[in-house]
Amino acid sequence: MVEQGQTSSAGQRLGAPETLGISTLDPGHKPPVMPPGKQMTVRVLLLDDTEVTFDLSHQCCGRVLFDMVCSHLNLIEGDYFGLEFHNHHRQTVWLDLLKPIRKQITRSKHTVLRFVVKFFPPDHSLLLEELTRYLFALQVRQDLTSGRLTCSDASAALLVSHIIQSEIGDFEETQCRQHLLNTNYIPDQMALMDKIMEFHHRHIGQTPAVSDQHLLEVACRLEMYGIRLHPTKDKEGTRLNLAVAHSGVLVFQGHTRINIFSWSKVRKLSFKRRKFLVKLRADPSQNIGPDTLEFLMASRDCCKMFWKICVEYHAFFRLYEEPRARPKAVLFPRGSCFRFSGRTQKQVIDYVKENEFKKLPYERKHSRVQYNSSSTSPLHSALPKQAGRQSWEGSFLASSEDSAVKPTGNSSPSNLENGCSNQMENSRRQADKQQHTDQSEVTKAQVTLVNGYTDDYRGATPSPLISPVLNDSAAKRIDEEEDNRTKICPGDDAYFITKELLNTERTYLKDLELITVWFQGVLDKEECVHDSLKKLLTSTYGPLHTHHTQFLQELEERLSMWEGPSNVQVKEDFRCVGDLLLKLISDLKSLSAELQMSSDCVYVLEKACAASQRLTFVCRDFEQQKVCYIPLNVFLLRPRHRLLHYKQILDRLCKHYPSTHNQYSKCKAALSDVCELESELHSALVDTENFQKLLELQKDLIGVEDLAVSGRQLIRLGCLSKLSGKGLQQRMFFLFNDVLLYSTRGITSTNQFSVHRQLPLRGMTIRESEDEWGVPHSFTLMVQQQSLVVAACSESEMEKWMEDIKIAVDLAEECNGLIGGLLMSNSDIKSSGVSEVDSEDDLGGSQSFTMRHGNSSVNIHHRGNTTAHVCWHRNTSVSMMDFSIAIENQLSGNLLRKFKNSNGWQKLWVVFTNFTLFFYKTHEDEYPLASLPLLGYSVIKAGESENIHKDHVFKLHFKSHVYYFRTESEYFFQRWMTVIRSATIPASRTRYLNRTEPD
């Protein structure tokens, strides 16, 4: 697999002008060349109280020093931070990155600059790097200790409990009490010691990185989080404080916020001597004209300093890119020429998501523990262990020749890679030395996950924007010499169609074994499972498994006689498959009752889970095992899906053979039979597929109930950006035929989305609003005298959403009594075991779904690789039509993937299903080694410029990620291109409506 290397400088990566550098540097990247002149030594105090000295020219601008600090820390998201110091007036000011340091710091030997957080985002999940979140956690700790971050006693105790969990590890009463006696985190800590220890006891098993996440989650909801007060007075002389935040300019009286001027309402901010002026926009809806508010500060310098930070906050959080410099006046300059310099928040987030970085270790100065907590379920003993630690899309494809990634510990749901202390490095040099030998795959094994979970912390959900990692040892390596000795297969398309049938039949039989062997083996050990359910599964899938086992044996024998060097002498009767398929379909007609019952099994199992919490836990835990690489209900419907595949195979055979061929009549008869059988079961399959998707969403969402009810249909799910006073904020939207739901923020620590609001579709109107708001690809939803402005990532996405919403509004008129209270109350959410911190006094934190079993409690963790998660990370959407097409476009077979820096290829068994490629060493493996969701990817034929001198090579591309695969023939090249495009090019809703009836 080839990935484009990062050869550009840090400034070039973010698109910064070369003269200005950039505020973040690659690890080990050298800062710009120092200008000549006298050297000066500058001291910088870091957030962990470490003091570092830097030698630089006195002619250097502030940017050079800031880059040196970021380079020293290996910090990628440095744009959130700044350097502050006390000037000669003893005022705390920010180091201007564009001005020479000598003009700002007059006595460098006696000045200590502090590296601190400058811009506080509203949501900690926007911080994508674990190191960044660690530095933010240190800032919160400092603010607590200094008294700057004020909050209630309960919130303060909860914050301190997360801090000491990251510093001393799991709760032990004597150690915890002694640590609190020796270390002071908050004023009046002794009075809250018991409360702190009570909260600390609840955090057992949390790693330092996870504790940072929870600490920031609580801190972000506090009113004084990130607030830096600037004393002022109003016209009446009342003492007030001004502050600036991501949302706008805030007014405080003491530590109580009394007003906010959001950016959308502010027309202009300016200052005149000691007066700070806020000019507001007119509000026609309330007959209020433009207004100007004045605030009097202590001095002109104080006023200008606050005005500068307001300008920077507005640009960082509200603009898409760095503002351009204003040309200087030639004769009479007026006003300040100050502007924001650096990347905006949007640019930083896009940059980190689109690029890969090595995870270099960093030291947690205050932490005494570095560990991975793991909790093993009782069911794990019956199923394969998930030995490695890797993100669910991080379980991709990177050879040993790719650069190794060194983890730094557990990361947050937004991190590009879950930190994994037990992840092994790829041995690049060893692979280079042995790439032309038969022992090239002796590199260290790297076991990966496919269900989005890891043993040490299943709650963390990584972004799927990173490279797949799969070592040479995962599959056979084929170099140039060995590749030239590959056997020559028959050139007849009938042979390749038959081989496709064989490959997909092997995968189908493995899927049946998951039910008949793995799942039933688990159920047999559980007393909570009723015998009727076990009998239903056995009587439904047992006969199908037996029948297809025999068919697979006959098919393998037929193909073995067909291929090879002696195939020319083989009798014509053995170079065909029509007779086997005709017999197969005839036998399946006798098993039509079992095929019908496969749909009923989904409903029966869901009803049994609703009646038994223990069975719910059993099923959820089984879904987390590596062998269950897609949702369990999908496996239950596999017999119905297989009929569609037989129909496609027979249709291609009929088109291949002329009508005079002896195989044509057999294939035509088999096709007629399978069409008749599929037509009888089609309507039930459509309803069951919709029900299965609703059940899957019910597991992915927090705060909704009774989602999977009769009559409700899923239409589309995916990402849109909601426009609010805080700017554009990414949200997950779920469109049904009666209601539109959207989530609050990102993915919670339980791998779920918390639903914030439901919008009824009856009476809803929709219009484009790009010109109205100036936001690309935006449209407005109006319902019940309320409006919601959202923006899609592209014009095509906007058109698909608008088309589907209009159709859903029409369908909503046909729904009778469907609309109800889908959203759960806060008390219902807490009673279900899921707890979120909605205010500073709601102290539950984000926990996994807890369920009682016997005398102990067990945690239900949720899948982290569902379609909703992929849509969230890829900022895209899928419709029910896309799901239907994905069912038909499933494929299995061998693919060769190219190594990065050599001509070698790696042979893998690949299964494409559910918009995802799953990679195995061979077709006999029980579970996949890696996975690659394809939503958002593009697939094209590799061109001559790719420098790959092979036939049948296609390229997968997503932003900076590029992978090459090779097939054995032109037939399979076209087939893989077709099925992959079905996942990368979503269908329209109109086509879906035309397909609701069988052919």
Image (cartoon, grey):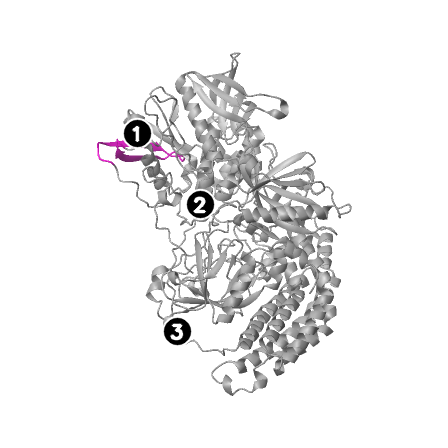
Residue at which label 3 appears: 482
For image coordinates 47% across by 83% down, the residue present is 565
Q: What's the CA distance linking mark 1 and mark 3?
A: 62 Å
Toward the viewer: 196 or 255?
A: 255
Q: Is residue 992 visible?
A: yes
**In terms of sequence position, does the residue under pointer 3 or pointer 2 come before the other?**
2
Quadrant the N terminus occupies: bottom left
| Quadrant position of residue 935 | bottom right
The answer to whether mark 3 and mark 2 are in CB contact below 8 A is no
Name the residue type under label 3: Glu
Q: Position of residue 631 (x, y in %)?
A: 62, 57
Q: How many marks?
A: 3
Q: Secondary structure at mark 2?
A: helix
> Above or below — where is 981 with respect to 760?
below
Toward the viewer: 186 or 970?
A: 970
Crowding at label 3, few (<14), some or many (≥20) Cα neighbours within 10 Å?
A: few
In the visual, does 806 lie left or right of 414? right
Name the outermost residue toward the left.
37
Q: Secondary structure at mark 1?
A: helix
Q: Position of residue 431 (x, y in %)?
A: 36, 63
Q: Residue 115 magenta-drawn? A: no
Q: Position of residue 678 (x, y in %)?
A: 70, 67
The answer to whether mark 1 and mark 3 are in CB contact below 8 A is no
Give the extent of the magenta segment: 35-59
Quadrant the C terminus occupies: bottom right
Q: Which mark is residue 352?
A: 2
> Above or below — where is 559 with respect to 680?
below
Q: Position of residue 933 (x, y in %)?
A: 53, 56
Q: Which mark is residue 101?
A: 1
